[in-house]
Image (cartoon, helix red, strand yellow):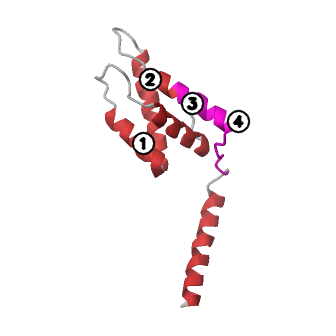
């Protein structure tokens, strides 16, 4: 029984290290005071700004913002995890007939941008 548990644990560890090596560069952790933190903060501010784009008569910026945010949220949701669930929630509320592009809270913007910086997803 001890051999079986040891074999299963080492098998899991080996598969984890192999998948980590093949996935490319290591994800950058977002830590306060580091460049990644500032990048995530700037991305969250941009995300909030773009999500507040309104539909005015003849305003092509709305369509651009809708597509840009939609692609970004698709990329984040593809990574899965908690940030992926947040992205799916925001995507579910997006509608091209609404006045604003998307409803994103400050906390949602931070979670999405932090995940994007850690996973190398551009906005």
Q: CA distance from mark 4 to mark 2?
A: 26 Å
Q: Evaluate if marks 2 and 3 touch, with contact meaning CB atoms under 8 Å apart.
A: no
Magenta span of residues: 26-46
Q: Residue at x 39, y 11 (%)?
A: 59
How far apart are labels 3 and 4 at the CA level? 12 Å
Judging from the image, what secondary structure is the residue with disc 1 in?
helix
Q: Is residue 30 visible?
A: yes
- Who comes first in sequence, dot 4 or dot 2? 4
The residue pinned by badge 2 equals 65
Q: Marks 1 and 2, how far apart in space? A: 19 Å
Q: Nearer the viewer, residue 38 or 14?
A: 38
Q: From the viewer's perspective, is 103 left or right of 111?
A: left
Name the residue carrying label 1.
86
User: Which is closer to the viewer, label 2 or label 3?
Assistant: 3
User: Where does the image place residue 118, in percent across and percent down from the top left?
Assistant: 60, 44
Q: Which residue is found at the position 53% from the left and 91% from the top? A: 1
Q: Residues within 10 Å of mark 4 (few under 14, many from 20)?
A: few
Q: In this picture, is 20 found above or below 11? A: above
Of callouts 3 and 1, the N-terminal one: 3
């Amino acid at each position: 029984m001890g051999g079986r548990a040891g074999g299963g644990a080492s098998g899991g560890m080996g598969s984890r290290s192999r998948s980590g090596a093949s996935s490319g560069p290591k994800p950058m952790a977002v830590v306060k005071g580091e460049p990644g933190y500032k990048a995530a903060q700037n991305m969250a501010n941009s995300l909030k700004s773009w999500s507040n784009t309104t539909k005015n008569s003849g305003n092509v910026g709305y369509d651009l913002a809708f597509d840009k945010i939609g692609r970004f949220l698709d990329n984040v949701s593809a990574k899965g995890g908690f940030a992926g669930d947040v992205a799916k929630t925001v995507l579910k509320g997006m509608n091209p007939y609404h006045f604003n592009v998307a409803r994103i809270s400050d906390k949602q913007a931070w979670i999405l941008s932090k995940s994007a910086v850690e996973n190398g997803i551009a906005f």
